[in-house]
Image (spheres, rainbow, N blue to C red):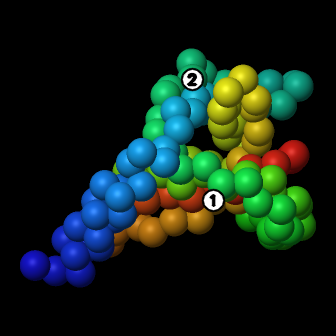
Amino acid sequence: MGLPDIIRRAVATVEGIAGPLRARVLLPRVTGRNAYGPTYGTPEPQLAMVEQVGQTVASQDGTEKLSTSKFTFFEPVVIHEGDRLTLNGVTTTVIKVEGLLDPDGVPYMAVALTGKP
């Protein structure tokens, strides 16, 4: 058993423990851009552990932004900065993505920090 298998098993163990703590969130993906900004597709339901945070993070372009929520996905969910997450009717924008990728670039798990873009 190699390192990727060990990490997958560890993430699956954590997912089993955190299962009851996860909430259903909607993730509409960015499908393109128009003159007004990004356009979004149909929201896809996902399960994530949600935490309220209040921390300053540096986004991919280097600007500092205030993150208000942290969404942890214990499955291979691909998320990008600019995507939106909706929980209980409140929509926030992903301002930073963290996570752990396997050697093929597939996420073991993903963490999205959200706030105002």
Residue 99 appears left or right of 89? left
Crowding at mark 2 (Cα within 10 Å: few <14, some 14-19, many 20+) = some
Give the class, few, some or many, for how many residues have Cα within 10 Å of label 1's Cα (few <14, many ≥20).
Answer: some
User: x%, y% of residue 109?
Assistant: 43, 59
- Residue closer to the observer: 91 or 76: 91
Q: Is residue 27 above or below residue 59?
A: above
Cα separation between marks 1 and 2: 18 Å
- Tell me the number on the disc at residue 63: none
Q: Residue at x 83, y 62 (%)?
A: 54
Under mark 1, the amino acid is: Val
Residue where numbered disc 1 is placed:
97
- In percent of width and height, residue 20 lies at 42, 45
Look at the image and tell me whether residue 31 can be seen. no
The secondary element bearing badge 1 is classed as strand
Residues 38 and 22: in front is: 22
Secondary structure beneath dot 2 equals loop
Whether residue 88 is visible to the viewer of this picture, yes or no, is yes
Examine the image and state in which quarter residue 113 appears. Answer: bottom right
The residue lying at 86 percent from left, 68 percent from top is 56
Q: In this view of the protein, which residue sits in the foreground, 37 or 49?
A: 49
Q: Is residue 56 left or right of residue 10?
A: right
Do the residues bearing badges 1 and 2 touch, measured as CB atoms within 8 Å? no
Q: Which residue is situated farthest in the left direction here?
A: 1
Say whether residue 73 is left or right of residue 114.
left
Establish if 21 lies above or below 42. Answer: below
Circle 2 residue: 43
Which of the marked residues, 1 or 2, is nearer the chain's N terminus?
Answer: 2
Residue shown at 35% from the left, 58% from the top: 17
Q: Relative to 61, say whether 95 is above or below.
A: above
Callout 2 amino acid: Pro
